[in-house]
Image (cartoon, rainbow, N blue to C red):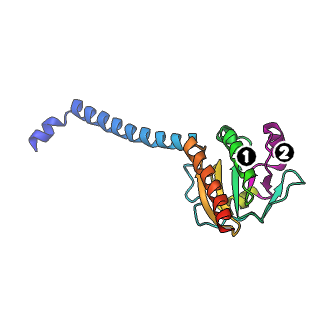
C-alpha cells in the first residue's frame, strides 16, 4: 500500500490521466472513422432499422414526375432506385444506374423505376438536368413513405417482386462489384423467365 501511495505522486497521476485521455480519444477516432465511412457510402449511421430482404415495400402514395409515366405492375420484378436530388452519392451512382436501366430495357419482365424523396418540382428539374430516361416517381408524403418502407438513407438499389417483397437491397453508392451483382440479378430473372416458357 505504501508503494502505491509513493507511486501516485502528482507527476505519475498526471501521466496516468494523459494515458486515459489518449485511450478515450483513440476509441472516439475509431467510432468517428466508422461513421464517416458509412456517411461516405451514403448510408445513414443513425438508422436503427432499414429495409431488408423479405420486407414488404409498398409503392402506394407515389406519383409520376412525368404525367405520361405509369407504374409497371405486370413485370415479375422491379428494380428501384431510391435517391434525392441533393445526395452526392446518388449523383455519383447515376452512370451505373444508366447502365442498369439499359440492361433492364432488354429484360421484358423487369421494370425499372426511380423514386425520389424530394418534392415534385425539384425532382422534375433534376430528371431533366440528369437526362433520366426511366420513369421517376415522388412520394406524396415523404415522411410517411420513408417510415412505412424503412427507406432510411440514400441511395438504395432494390429488387422487388410484384408481390411487394424485397428480394435484394444494395445500400449506399454502388461499387463496381455491386453493379455487377445487380446486372447478374436482372439477367438471372430474364433467364428464368425464358427457361420456364
Provide residue 114's location: percent of width, then percent of height: 74, 51
Mark 1 Cα within 10 Å, few/some/many (few <14, many 20+)? some
On whether residue 75 falls in the magenta region, the answer is: no
Image quarter of residue 158: bottom right
Instruction: Give me the residue at 59% from left, 66% from top.
Output: 54
Q: Is residue 24 above or below residue 76?
A: above
Image quarter of residue 72: bottom right
Instruction: Give me the residue at 64% from left, 51% from top.
Output: 156
Quadrant of the frame with the N terminus: top left
What residue sits right under mark 2 in the picture?
124
Quadrant of the frame with the C terminus: bottom right
In-front residue for pair 101/163: 101
What residue sits right under mark 1 in the picture?
102
Provide residue 127's location: percent of width, then percent of height: 81, 43
Image quarter of residue 3: top left
The answer to whether residue 87 shows anywhere in this view is: no
| Sequence-first tag of 2 and 1 | 1
Q: Is residue 9 above or below residue 173?
A: above
Identify the magenta region.
Answer: 112-141
Instruction: Give me the residue at 84% from left, 58% from top.
Output: 70
Provide residue 48's location: percent of width, then percent of height: 55, 57
In-front residue for pair 95/57: 95
Secondary structure of residue under mark 2:
helix
Amino acid at each position: 500500500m505504501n508503494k502505491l501511495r509513493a507511486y501516485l505522486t502528482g507527476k505519475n497521476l498526471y501521466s496516468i490521466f494523459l494515458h486515459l485521455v489518449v485511450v478515450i480519444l483513440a476509441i472516439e477516432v475509431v467510432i468517428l472513422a466508422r461513421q464517416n465511412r458509412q456517411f461516405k457510402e451514403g448510408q445513414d449511421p443513425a438508422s436503427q432499422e432499414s429495409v431488408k430482404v423479405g420486407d414488404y415495400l409498398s409503392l402506394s402514395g407515389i406519383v409520376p414526375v412525368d404525367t405520361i409515366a405509369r407504374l409497371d405492375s405486370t413485370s415479375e420484378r422491379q428494380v428501384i432506385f431510391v435517391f434525392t436530388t441533393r445526395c452526392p452519392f446518388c449523383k455519383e451512382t447515376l452512370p451505373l444506374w444508366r447502365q442498369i436501366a439499359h440492361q433492364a430495357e432488354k429484360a421484358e419482365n423487369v421494370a425499372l423505376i426511380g423514386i425520389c424523396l424530394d418534392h415534385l418540382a425539384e425532382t422534375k428539374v433534376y430528371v431533366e438536368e440528369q437526362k433520366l430516361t426511366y420513369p421517376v416517381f415522388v412520394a406524396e408524403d415523404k415522411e410517411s413513405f420513408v417510415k412505412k418502407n424503412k427507406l432510411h438513407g440514400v441511395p438504395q438499389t432494390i429488387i422487388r417482386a410484384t408481390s411487394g417483397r424485397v428480394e435484394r437491397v444494395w445500400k449506399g453508392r454502388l461499387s463496381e462489384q455491386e453493379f455487377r451483382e445487380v446486372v447478374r440479378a436482372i439477367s438471372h430473372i430474364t433467364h428464368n423467365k425464358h427457361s420456364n416458357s
